[in-house]
Image (spheres, rainbow, N blue to C red):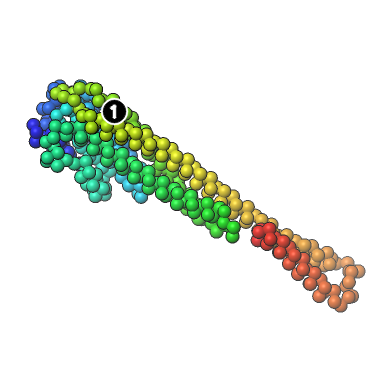
Amino acid sequence: MGAHKIIQLVHPTQTELENAFNLFESSCSSGKLHDVARRGLSNSDVRLRTEPFPKVEMHDSYVYGVLASPTDVEDAKSEYFNIHFVVNASMALTVVWGVDETDAERRLSLSERISFTSSEEDSESAPGDCIVRIATVVVEDLENVLTDLHSHANQELEELESELFNLDGLSESSADIAERYQKVSLLKFEILSMNTTVEETKNVLFVLDQLDAVRLTPGVLFSKDQQISINDLLMRSRSLKAQRADLEDEVRLIFDRLESIENQRQTKAQLRLGSVASILLLPALIVGFFGQNFNNTPWGDFDPSWKINTAGLAVIAGIQFVYFRRKKWL
């Protein structure tokens, strides 16, 4: 049995799964995997690809669970790798399922990080170490994704703050604002999609943390060192929950900044339009007044009147232009 303490599969065939099930069942006192564990390990629920639900369950003489690791923050898609596992005191079986063949490289990297060497597989603590290693990799991946999302949000917020308080005026156009709205919306979607995954990962680690006193035939599932590691991961998952909530608030602030920039841009456009209309209004009023068709028009016979009128119109327009310029309406 020592050669089969750890069985690790990645996108296995049905035959590979059945062989692994038979090997694991031979180490179980109950002698049979429950249908719930079989369906999970077989990846029969395709919804778990985009709607993962990390969980852990006690099935008589073994523990069945699933944890989820996000594919990539850069793809702007909420997709996950699902790592299913069944573990008892003498053997562990893990199965990694991804989205499709396009994620092969990232899936390979994930499977290598949770894999065991031959010497590690023969260790008495290998089954417990298997759960600890999977949980560690998942928590690290969630931390990395949140760090990336936080970096994206900070960069976006800094640019918007600079734009919002730019003394030389706003340079954003409506098209730019719309593009930024789309970018931030994708960011928000990614953050919101992680809510269930982060929350349920924390719940899984909490349950595992409570298994320290549970005895599974023929021995104890977790050693003292493994219990400490699980507890540490639980604390990190609680921190992840708080970070995700803070990030959601930060994205909400970005949306507020975008709205403020758009409002300022529209206000400035209205002021500019009003200023131009005002500059044209007074000269038009004067021209209209003197252009009335009456027999007696003031200054009609006065030769310099045209020059005086032209100069007056220019002075009025200039005064208004300087005023609106100082008010930064133009």
Residue 207 location (% of width, % of height): 30, 27
Image quarter (top left, top right, bottom left or bottom right) of the C terminus: bottom right
Asked where in the image residue 136 lies, by quadrant, the reply is top left
Residue at 25% x, 30% y: name it: 227
Q: Is residue 124 left or right of residue 251?
A: left
**With 69 as the anchor, is 88 left or right in this view?**
left
Query: Is residue 210 shown to the viewer in this render?
Result: yes
Q: Amino acid at mark 1?
A: Asp
In what element is the residue under mark 1?
helix
How many numbered tags mark residues here? 1
Figure quadrant of residue 293: bottom right
Q: Nearer the viewer, residue 300 or 26?
A: 26
At 72% across and 61% down in the image, what residue appears?
A: 323
Q: Residues within 10 Å of mark 1 (few under 14, many from 20)?
A: many
* Residue 38 seen anywhere in this rendered image of the structure: no
- Residue 75 image position (x, y, % from top left): 35, 49
Residue occupying image coordinates x 9% and y 33%? 2
Residue 215 drawn at (x, y percent) = 20, 22
Residue that lies at the very extreme toward the bottom in this rendered image: 303
Q: Which residue is mark 1?
A: 209
* Residue 158 versus residue 134 in the image, above or below: below
> Picture quarter containing residue 171?
bottom right
| Placement of the N terminus among the 4 image quadrants | top left
Please name the residue shown 11% across and 31% down the image: 23
Residue 81: horizontal and vertical position, in percent? Answer: 28, 41
